[in-house]
Image (cartoon, rainbow, N blue to C red):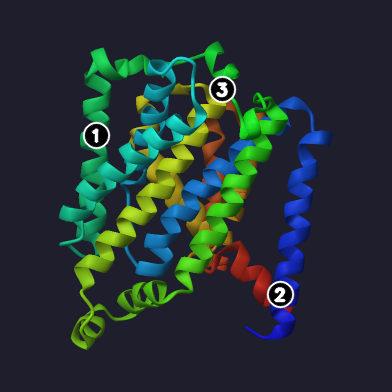
């Protein structure tokens, strides 16, 4: 990357970050919470991009990592008195990492569509367990921790309001992006991209492909679980619907819309999709998915590199 592009990149990054910091001070309550939710879904999509965009492994199991992160956080908030934010994050990450390790051990032995189907099956297995294990997970109703969550101390023991929660989520998402960006530019990230481009040649060079794939799935699952923790903290509940494979499908759509293999693109894709869904649902009610689907098809045909790729080409003209 040239020096000029580096300056432009970090300038744009700083401006966007400053706008996101100021946003909760000027937005009404609904849009403040909506913006926070976009950041959370963006983090989930970004975690998926590690597999889809960098390792070339399409996963439909991210709903399991996301949902288990939610349930881990909910369990901590319900069992520990007074509620502790850091324990909730720890429990959620442990739950997501454990599931990711289990899925990775079996799924990474397969390639291409077989890997995708295997991750989908695992997500459905966890969905059925959570849906039917009523005594522990609350079954169909999930786990709700309601008002006590408002007493969770935030950063520096500041109680969470909608503004402070937004800033906390923004800080976590920003730190996650910078960490993942550094990882993808490291030798580990280069090997993942080599696996994506030519797995047989990467294996022939001497790299232990299976180990790199397992590490990629676990890393991706860890950040997906972190997104689940943030979602649970914001909405004060965990439900089996978030473990269902449709969530994984939406995450893949976020990546395709925004731009695969960019980290920033999935966040842009999540924002675009959620804004579309919110806008059309007000006019088309239960039929809102029809115009959203038509726009998505048009974007896949005319902007196959996603919104971020389209903007890059437009700026380079």
Q: Quick check: 247 left or right of 206?
A: right
Sequence-first tag of 3 and 1: 1
Residue at 60% across, 44% down: 39
Pointer 2 with pointer 3, Cβ within 8 A:
no
**Badge 1 element:** helix
Q: Is residue 275 above or below residue 148?
A: below
From the top left corner, tell me how far across and down residue 277 is, in percent: 59, 38
From the top left corner, tell me how far across and down residue 140 is, in percent: 33, 17
Residue at 34% across, 79% down: 194
Disc assigned to residue 194: none
Q: Is residue 104 above or below residue 81?
A: below
Q: Residues within 10 Å of mark 2 (few under 14, many from 20)?
A: few
Pointer 3 with pointer 1, Cβ within 8 A:
no
From the top left corner, tell me how far across and down residue 258 is, in percent: 56, 59
- Using the rendered image of the protein, determine whether residue 317 is visible from the camera's viewpoint: no
Residue identifier under label 3: 152
From the top left corner, tell me how far across and down residue 267 is, in percent: 58, 53
Residue identifier under label 2: 314
Disc assigned to residue 126: 1
Question: Of circles 3 and 1, which is in front?
Answer: 3
């Amino acid at each position: 990357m040239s020096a000029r592009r580096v300056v432009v990149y970090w300038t744009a990054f700083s401006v966007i970050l400053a706008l996101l910091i100021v946003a909760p001070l000027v937005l009404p309550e609904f849009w403040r919470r909506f913006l926070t939710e976009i950041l959370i879904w963006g983090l989930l999509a970004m975690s998926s991009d590690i597999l889809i965009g960098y390792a070339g492994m399409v996963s439909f199991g991210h709903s399991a990592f996301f949902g288990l992160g939610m349930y881990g956080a909910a369990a901590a908030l319900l069992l520990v008195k007074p509620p502790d934010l850091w324990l909730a994050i720890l429990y959620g990450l442990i739950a997501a990492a454990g599931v990711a390790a289990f899925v990775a051990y079996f799924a990474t032995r397969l390639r291409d569509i077989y890997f995708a189907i295997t991750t989908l099956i695992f997500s459905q297995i966890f969905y059925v367990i959570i849906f039917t294990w009523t005594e522990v997970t609350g079954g169909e109703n999930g786990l709700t921790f309601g008002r006590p969550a408002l007493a969770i101390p935030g950063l520096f023991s500041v109680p969470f309001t909608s503004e402070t929660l937004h800033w906390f989520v923004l800080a976590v998402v920003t730190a996650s992006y910078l960490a993942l960006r550094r990882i993808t530019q490291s030798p580990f990230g280069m090997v993942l991209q080599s696996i994506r481009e030519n797995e047989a040649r990467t294996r022939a060079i001497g790299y232990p492909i299976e180990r790199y794939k397992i590490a990629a799935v676990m890393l991706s699952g860890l950040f997906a679980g972190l997104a689940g923790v943030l979602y649970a903290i914001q909405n004060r509940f965990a439900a089996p619907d978030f473990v269902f494979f449709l969530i994984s499908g939406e995450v893949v759509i976020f990546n395709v819309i925004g731009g695969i293999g960019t980290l920033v693109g999935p966040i842009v894709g999540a924002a675009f999709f959620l804004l579309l869904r919110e806008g059309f649902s007000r006019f088309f009610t239960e039929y809102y998915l029809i115009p959203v689907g038509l726009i998505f098809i048009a974007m896949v045909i005319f902007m196959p590199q996603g919104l971020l790729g389209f903007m890059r080409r437009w700026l380079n003209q």
